[in-house]
Amino acid sequence: MKDDQPNGKLKELKQYMESHPKSSSLRGHHFILKNLLFSIYSANQTEGFPEEELSQLLAKYTTDSVCKEEAGEVVFYVSSIKTKPTALKEAYLECLETERLSVRLGLPERVMHFESIEFAHLFQNVSSTMMEDYCAKILRPLLEKDAEYSQEMIRTLEVFIRNDGQVNEAAKQLFIHRNTVTYRLEKISDLLQVDFKKVNDLLKLKAVFLFRQFLHVRP
């Protein structure tokens, strides 16, 4: 998290997180570095690290009224899990890169994981022309349809891909029935000649919507 007054609000947030019961059970350690709060959570070597539990805790911090009073708007950037203390610098840099790319792409999530923007990190230097050509190639059968139909189907596909192929979650975010999502995906599969059960096809579509995000923010 960033703050312009590290000796004020960040200290209050640090104390709040240290005193939270869940933070203790997850063995969290918090440090103020310049205008950032850097937190380290210890993993159990035999049981692994409860990533979902941490994500839920961080999400709760972003909505907790006490937390908001102390630190205003809070955004957390989470690195991939590290197995050696020497990798802490890498974890710190991953958090900074996650912040940079999520701000650049205008991502609204309040808890951002490095894994979620890793594709963007890899492809950020691809030229706009190559991105446009690739998107046009993959989506052409949809783009050639009626504009309203095309927009609706592309939006459905985008939300489906963003939610890792979870139909129920896509339906919830689109405010439509899951059967409607399933029906649209069947039509999209036929039009684009893609199989949502194939990793290669999913990766192609993930790249398409990543490129569209980059193209949207580039001048």
Image: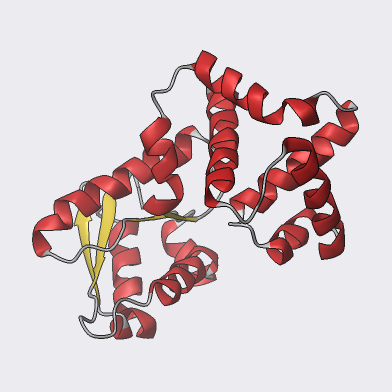
Residue 36: percent from left, percent from top: 28, 50
Way the structure is coloured: secondary structure
The residue located at (57%, 32%) in the rendering is 213
Image-based side of 206 in relation to 6, left or right: right
Front residue (pair 173, 63) = 173
- 141 left or right of 59 in image: right
Above/below status of 28 relative to 80? below
- Residue drawn at point x = 53 percent, y = 45 percent: 200
Rendered position, 28 above or below 122: below
Front residue of 120/7: it is: 120
Identify the image quadrant of the C terminus: top right
Q: What x and y, as percent, mark residue 45? A: 20, 80
| Image location of residue 179, percent across then percent down | 85, 63
Dividing the picture into quarters, in which one does residue 141 lie?
Answer: top right
Residue 35 in view (yes/no): no
Q: Nearer the viewer, residue 203 or 46?
A: 203
| Residue 145 visible in image | yes
Near-viewer residue (40 or 51): 51
Query: Residue furthest toward the left?
Result: 86
Image point 29% across, 66% down: which residue? 14
Give the residue drawn at x 58%, y 24%: 134
Q: Residue 180 at x, y = what percent?
A: 87, 57
Q: 192 above or below 9?
A: above
